[in-house]
Amino acid sequence: MWAAARAGPGDDRGDGLICGRGQDAPARAIEDGADLGPLPEWNLADLYESMESPAYAADLARAASECRAFSDTFRGKLEAIATGPNAGEELAAAIRRYEAIEDLLGRIMSYAGLVYSADTTDPKRSKFYGDAQERITAASSDLLFFQLELNRLDETLIAKAMAAAALAHYRPWIEDTRRERPYQLDDKLEQLFHEKSVTGRSAWNRLFDETIAALRFRIAGKELTLDPALNLMQDPREEVRKEASEALAQTLKGHLRTFTLITNTLGKDKEISDRWRGFEDVADQRHLANRVEREVVDALVLAVQEAHPRLSHRYYNLKAKWFGKERLDHWDRNAPLPRVATRTYPWAEARDTVLAAYGGFSPKMATIAERFFDGAWIDAPVRPGKAPGAFAHPTVPSAHPYVLLNYQGKPRDVMTLAHELGHGVHQVLAAPNGALMAPTPLTLAETASVFGEMLTFRALLAKTTDAAERKAMLAAKVEDMLNTVVRQIAFYSFERKVHTQRRGGELLAEQICELWMSVQGDSLGPSIRLGPGYETFWSYIPHFIHSPFYVYAYAFGDCLVNSLYGVYQKAAAGFAERYFAMLAAGGTKHHSELLAPFGLDARDPAFWQIGLTMIEGMIVELEGLEG
């Protein structure tokens, strides 16, 4: 469903890619007056023509009808089917029907979510999205029984039924579903959890989104939304960065009570769910959804934390020297290097850059990515009320993905375009698996996006002959990798502390701020001065709200891609075919199966050192450059 699909780049990649809105299309200029050329806006007609579309209204009614009919046909009857002479074929027919309904429900909610994301401050769109959530939640309550009954079937019955080819096709989905068995509740409780989500978690998610979208930050006499304000934290002028940071802190502090209430409420909501379902650790539900073992994540976290001195601490010490300072203020952390001009990329150049990089790896990859431009599948302008940061939403296999950006022409915006198109390529390739098996666990969902960034970065670096520009590009890439690996693991540690302590009672805003500062200090090191106001910066990060513990997937993906890229550099022949096969698998295979053809194993503690060593190598190269 929509909320679970809000994927995108790291929330704090430069403290600048989270939430934004801008002017009407065709948007040409950003705050500094740079000419970006016409920016594309998506055309959602491939889903529905408009909010008033008769087809949309008809599908809403059909969804409710088909859910009821499915329940009338199969509720309480799966065991009888499973013990019958044609168990495999009949169960497969039931799953195919279930899958078709899921595709229909996903289409409706994808459209409502995308319309809402274009302007979350528009009351009409908010009502449209809210009404869709209520209608689909009510309809899909008639489907809850299906997975619950399927999981109650005896293992021997399922195994015997899967001897039929029709049911064997769904084996990955069935096996994934049955992993939920120890944590499922009885039917009535599951229905209660499901129906109350509209007035529970979903409502608090919506409050967060609408609060963030309505925030305004006064900088240089202008009232800015969050994304342009965060973008100024990368301005070449220190006084601008400082003013932006102080404006962010002032406004966020003024709304800290609301963000604290949201965090406390969702923390308690999660604790109740975890307790009733029997999850032991605060992150176990996320690990199960990601199909990754807790031990694998713990090994990643430990490897990254132990690498702080040779990665983030080392790099920021180097950057402070470049700026002629003993320590950098927090608003300098992602500042461009001094005496190096920051390029602005018009949209057309960004498009050509990414497509050329993709094409250099494989014409197939470029061809798929080009469809996003030609088909009006991208919404790029900054507009007031527009949804947070950037994402690639897969919608449903019967349609196609859509990409949302807040494009402002910065080099990181080009990388974000490459990132989201990587998601999009992945989603297109996985779609033939169908609505049940196309979705990829978050740990692998970041693979194609980060790989797309790496291809684009390497292509740009290879064309750069100017020493100063090369240094700036390397530094920017190192910072992106630190933000994706070190920062995201720090975010994960912060979430663990918040959810663990929340189990003991409500947390004061000051307590949450203290937890935030503790993990930031550890991860960034002594060369970054975390000044007054920075303690509030946890409050605008949406994944803490929408998808608890999502963030470690970025570090997982980045380290995984570094390892994959190393394999590619050593043996490019045949790599693209194996890579596309991995993406096309969608959610049908465990990470161990997908990585085996590349000779990689995420369960090996040494695996994480491959990716971390690549980051360290770039820092060593920067240390060897003069100036």
Image (spheres, rainbow, N blue to C red):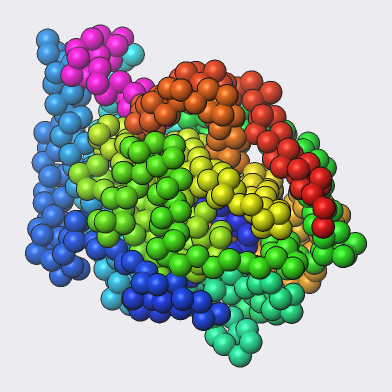
Residue 312: image x %, image y %?
76, 48
Magenta: main secondary structure equals helix
Q: Is residue 172 magenta?
A: yes
**In this view of the protein, which residue sits in the foreground, 537 or 449?**
449
Quick check: 317 above or below 430? Answer: below
**In this view of the protein, which residue sits in the foreground, 356 or 476?**
356
**In which quadrant of the rendered image does the C terminus lie?**
bottom right
Quick check: 58 above or below 183? Answer: below
Residue 163 visible within the image: yes
Q: Is residue 483 magenta?
A: no
Residue 516 located left or right of residue 547? right
Residue 89: image x %, image y %?
14, 18
Residue 383: image x %, image y %?
41, 75
Quick check: 503 above or below 299? Answer: below
Residue 305 located left or right of residue 435? right
Q: Residue furthest front?
A: 465
- What residue is at 31 percent from the left and 53 percent from the top? 372
- What residue is at 47 percent from the left and 18 percent from the top? 597
What stretch of residues is rendered in magenta? 156-180
- What residue is at 33 percent from the left and 66 percent from the top? 40
Q: Residue furthest right?
A: 326
**In this view of the protein, which residue sits in the foreground, 164 or 149?**
164
Residue 509 visible within the image: no
Residue 182: image x %, image y %?
45, 27
